[in-house]
Amino acid sequence: MMLSSPAVASPASRFMRESNLRVRENSSLAAVPLIQVSKLEKTYQTARGALTLFRELELTVVPGELMAIVGQSGTGKSTLLHILGALDAPTAGTVHCASTNVATLNAREAAAFRNREIGYVWQFHYLLPEFSALENVAMPLMARGINRRQALDDASNWLKEVDLQDRSEHRPGELSGGEQQRVALARALVGNPGLLLADEPTGDLDETTAGRIFDLLERLHVTHGLTSILVTHNLDLAARCTRTLRLEGGRLHAMGIAPPGVPA
């Protein structure tokens, strides 16, 4: 897939960058990474032999970053997100996320970690078709053991956050693609995670709708103090992030200037 050329950052994006930089400059916590990946390797066994995606990959992410990872298809961008979010395990190396070495978690511990610490948004929304938008957003809270009434109240508040309060009783099939992705974003954040992982969240949307979804993601990133990592082929959107890395040859390479406290 061809990568589009960078665009000029929007006023909202410039505000986000300036806000994040002020936080880093004024807080001693800025130097404490939220994510620290060291000597990461991932190898798959295939019919044609071993396929190694990552070799000695290093990554440091500080709180408050909105970071984009770009690269050609097949380089392992989604796999890297899966490893960061405890959905997959590395072949070698360490992956510390939110003070937890996720590479050492068993399946039950990994599920609890994901529910507590991480919000996910994928290219496809993965909403449950038989449930309403409100019920879909409430699902992570009910999985956490929160009673149904409280979970639905919290979900209702998040649907307001994404401007879908009037669509709460609609099922996914009754929503547009952009509305479905807004529901998915509300579901990802309803549990108040500190880290948002987004894998091509606008990939199935037209250009105008994709821009609106990114505007929303950008606003929620700022207002809720998130740290966000976005995988995308769209360099227009990547240019609006605080930092962009290219995954190539099994390693991450800096594009542009890294924020304070983060090695390029």
Image (spheres, rainbow, N blue to C red):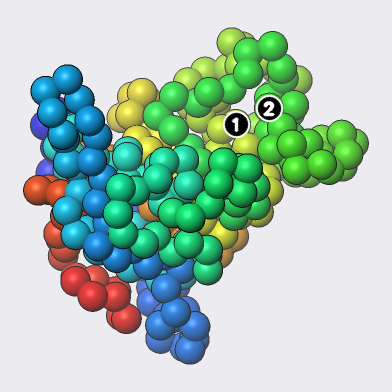
The crowd level at tag 2 (other Cα within 10 Å; few <14, some 14-19, many 20+) is many
The residue pinned by badge 2 equals 136
Specify the amino acid type for callout 1: Val
Image quarter in which the C terminus is found: bottom left
Which of 225/32 is in front? 32
12 sits left or right of 114 in the view:
left
Say whether residue 6 is visible. Answer: no
Image quarter in which the N terminus is found: top left
264 sits left or right of 187 in the view:
left
Estimate the x, y position of residue 104 in percent, counting from the top left: 48, 55
256 sits left or right of 231 in the view:
left
Estimate the x, y position of residue 97 in percent, counting from the top left: 47, 62
Circle 2 or circle 1, nearest the eye: 2
- Residue pictured at 24% horizontal, 71% vertical: 258
Specify the amino acid type for callout 2: Asn
Q: Quadrant of residue 4?
A: top left
Spatial separation of the CA atoms under disc 2 and disc 1: 8 Å
Mark 2–mark 1 CB contact (< 8 Å): yes
Say whether residue 128 is visible. Answer: yes
Q: Secondary structure at mark 1?
A: helix
Which of 189/113 is in front? 113
Which of 203/78 is in front? 78
The residue pinned by badge 1 equals 183
N-terminal label among 2 and 1? 2
